Amino acid sequence: MTSALLRFEEVEHVADAALRVYGRDWGELLVNAALGMFSLIAHWDDAPLSTRHHISLTSVDSETLLVDWLGELLYFHEMEGEVYVEFEILGASQTSLQAIAKGTDQWRPGTAIKAVTFNDLQIATTNAGFAVTIVFDI
Amino acid sequence: MIDKKDIKKIDKHLYEIPRNHRNDMRVPARIYADEQLLEAALRDRSLEQLVNTTTLPGVVRYTLAMPDIHRGYGFPIGGVAATEPPEGIISPGGIGYDINCGVRVLASTIEREAVETYVDDLIQAMYRLVPSGLGKGGIKMSKRDMDRVLERGAAWAVAKGYGTTEDLAHTEEEGCLAGADASTVSQRAKKRGLQQLGSLGSGNHFLEIDEIEEVYDKGVAQVFGLHEGCIAVQIHCGSRGLGHQVCTDYVRLLQKAVRKYGIELPDRELVCAPFGSPEGQDYFAAMAASANYAWANRHVIAHWVRRAFEEALAGKLSSWELTQVYDVAHNIGKVEQYTIDGRQTKLVIHRKGATRAFGPSSRELPHDYQGVGQPVLVPGSMGTASYILVAADKAHDLTFGSTCHGAGRVMSRTQAKKTIWGEDLIRDLREKGIVVQAGSMSGLAEEAPAAYKDVERVVDVVTGVGLAHKVARLVPLGVIKG
């Protein structure tokens, strides 16, 4: 990790969007991935958090869980017209997740994301925790 | 990493990465490009993605890159691969999340001079009537309607009063891909699609009013209804959230199929199943249903575009009409017949960012285009020209009846956002006489003309090879970006 505080950074992708995401632990990686995704999708100020969704997922492996988690948030974003900016991890293993996403409907559009892909998706264990590059279909 | 020395030049516009480049390649990879386009492909790692497609089980002859190739996910954008059923696979990553993203062109006999002062009004009317951006805003539908859309495609829209049967005849597959089964589409996908039929979406999707600036082939242009100096409209969009969800669902489901059928892949986004397997058949049925939704979507949008013209031109112009030139898919999987090693066989053709190109001999074209060829619609970037080509028979033999789909990106979205401001872009385009309406300034900056390759080079390659011939050049007067 280039900085102890760095949560995610946008990396170059010619057609789509890609994020390098870091986390000191697995739960933090999931939260930072979600924050990174919504930082692409929307701009928001200090809007009050008016909505919350409980999310419960079981997946076959950690990469699939990451894709499922972001895909779930993307679904709620599209259906409810909200963006999610705070997350509470109630429990997370490599293949299951219980979390609460808190959000707002006060936001301005950035880059619309169609889907989360498995393209070259490999969660790496580093000295500082975990890191992964995620490619989003735009 | 692929180096230029790994690539063999076969012809002026044809390059090949031989089968021995990597141990897991089953066939060679071929690239239609000129030197400059090839260099761009080498820089953005799209050729690695092309080589990955040659490893797919059942792939035949070679996989192909069109000159507008750029990096995607799984397959590159501008990629074409043919597999032979039943063992040959079908891969959602070879078709994309926006299933049946495509282009529709409407033409008119309205001269540019007659509407020049009303372009703003037309753009505003279109922006008001065609919902764009995130999520909702489409026409009201019941769940039963949804199943009918998925299985009947654009014909459902005509039955409901959107568009005409003449439009259907000028749509690839007449707007309905056979084999669709609504029961293979998840409830979540249907829920997303229920509120979005007749909406544009966002990203690179657009509505554009053009002038047909130049006609190269008067005979073919006449058959297509294209008149020099007159107005045309382009509609570029796809299957919205429904298609995105179907692809997401099946990329997830087929992770298991890959293990079940012992398929080894260099990238998980290439997940697939043998076409003849239950998993492969289910995906094909859901993909076809999504393609049908996309055709119905563009049919409804075309209806609203006509309505916008009626509103904006009321009392100003009389006796005009917008006739449909054609509607082509450029993210789709199709079963088509080809000759491989001297025998006729059905192949699954994956086109991801590639347009079908059936020449004059094809029996699958509408009656009035037989003997002429299929229109190939090649949008440029906003601010630059677009082309209407006519497909040649040569494409059948060289590229599994495929050609390019657009200009192709050359600058990353990150770079575009750093160097281009949406507001500046709107002003610059207006100075060139192009009206722009957009939902997001940063989204607009990402789609700036500078982010795209030169469409002229792309078209020069496909016409130079003889996959298609130029019919007309369109220049933009007004653009709506979702």
Image (cartoon, coloured by chain):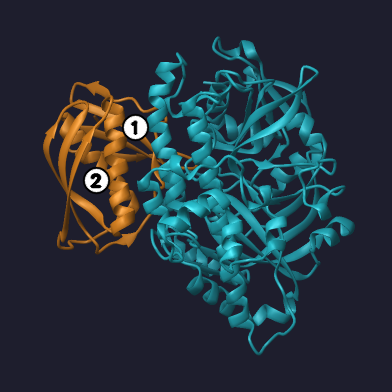
Q: What label sits on residue A133 in the rendered view?
A: 1
Mark 1 and mark 2 lie on one chain; the one further toward the N terminus is 2
Residue at the disc numbered 2: A35
Looking at the rendering, which quadrant does residue B179 occupy?
Answer: top right
Can residue A66 be seen?
yes
Q: Residue B423, percent across and down? A: 45, 66
Q: Is residue B450 left or right of residue B376?
A: left
Colour of the chain lettered B: cyan
Q: Say what secondary structure mark 2 lies in.
A: helix
Residue B23 on image: x %, y %: 55, 9
To which chain does the residue with label 1 belong?
A: A
Callouts 1 and 2 in the same chain = yes
Give whichever of A59, B416 is nearer the camera: A59
Secondary element at image label 1: strand
Q: Could you say where residue B352 lies in the image, as x and y percent from the top left?
A: 58, 38
Quarter location, residue B31: top right
Colour orange maps to chain: A
Amino acid type assigned to the residue bearing label 2 in the image: Leu
In the image, what residue occupies the spot 55% across and 24% down? B276
- Disc 1 marks a residue whose amino acid type is Thr
- B362 or B470, nearer to the observer: B362
Query: B159 or B76: nearer the eye?
Result: B159
